[in-house]
Amino acid sequence: MPLNMTKIAFGIESPAHLRERLAARAEAGEVRLTTRYLPKRHEEMAGGSLYWILNHMLIGRSPIRGFMENGQGRIWIRLRPELIPVRAIPKRAHQGWRYLEEKDAPPDLDIEGADARDAMPPQLLGELMKMGLV
């Protein structure tokens, strides 16, 4: 089973906004996020995903393509520029990224469930997620 990671979607207001941001940052079919260090368990992440945290909830995932040095002493986390919606589960905020075992990862949602959440105002979505209704 592949290993995953979690990261806060900083400055993002909704799942639709995150989708737009990923599409806008896509270059040569991938999005590159900069991090200081190569994860020690990076080899286990082949086939894994980066799960996004929004309003203290895991809301979606972007498949990891790999890791690469950027030539400036940093590492790029290479992602496919897509957001796959997942069943929202609570997740505490943290700095940087953290590992997420496959057994703890939420299941994917169908596209219809994601569309309804994207249409909601961000504040309403956040409140419904806190109550566990979405």
Image: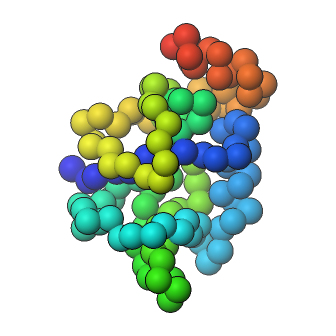
Which residue lies at the image location 27% right of the left edge and 43% below the top edge? 101
Q: Nearer the viewer, residue 43 or 11?
A: 11
Image spot of residue 11 (x, y percent): 70, 46
- Please provide percent x and percent y for residue 32: 56, 69
Please name whichever residue, 29 or 56, is drawn nearer the observer in this view of the structure: 56
Is residue 42 something one can see in this rendering? yes
Residue projecting furthest to the bottom: 71
Q: Is residue 118 above or below residue 42?
A: above
Residue 16 is at least partly visible in this image: no
- Of residues 9 and 133, the one drawn nearer to the viewer in this rendering: 9
- Up/down of 61 relative to 23, above or below: above
Say which residue appears at 50% left-offset and 36% top-offset. 93
The part of the image, by quadrant, that contains residue 12 is: top right
Coloring scheme used: rainbow
* Count of marks overlaid on the render: 0
Q: Residue at x 45, y 31 (%)?
A: 91
Judge left or right: residue 55 versus residue 48: right
Residue sitting nearer the eye, 51 or 47: 51
Image x and y of residue 7, in percent: 49, 48
| Residue beneath the point at 26% across and 65% down | 40
The quarter of the picture where the C terminus appears is top right
Residue 92 appears at what percent x and percent y? 46, 31
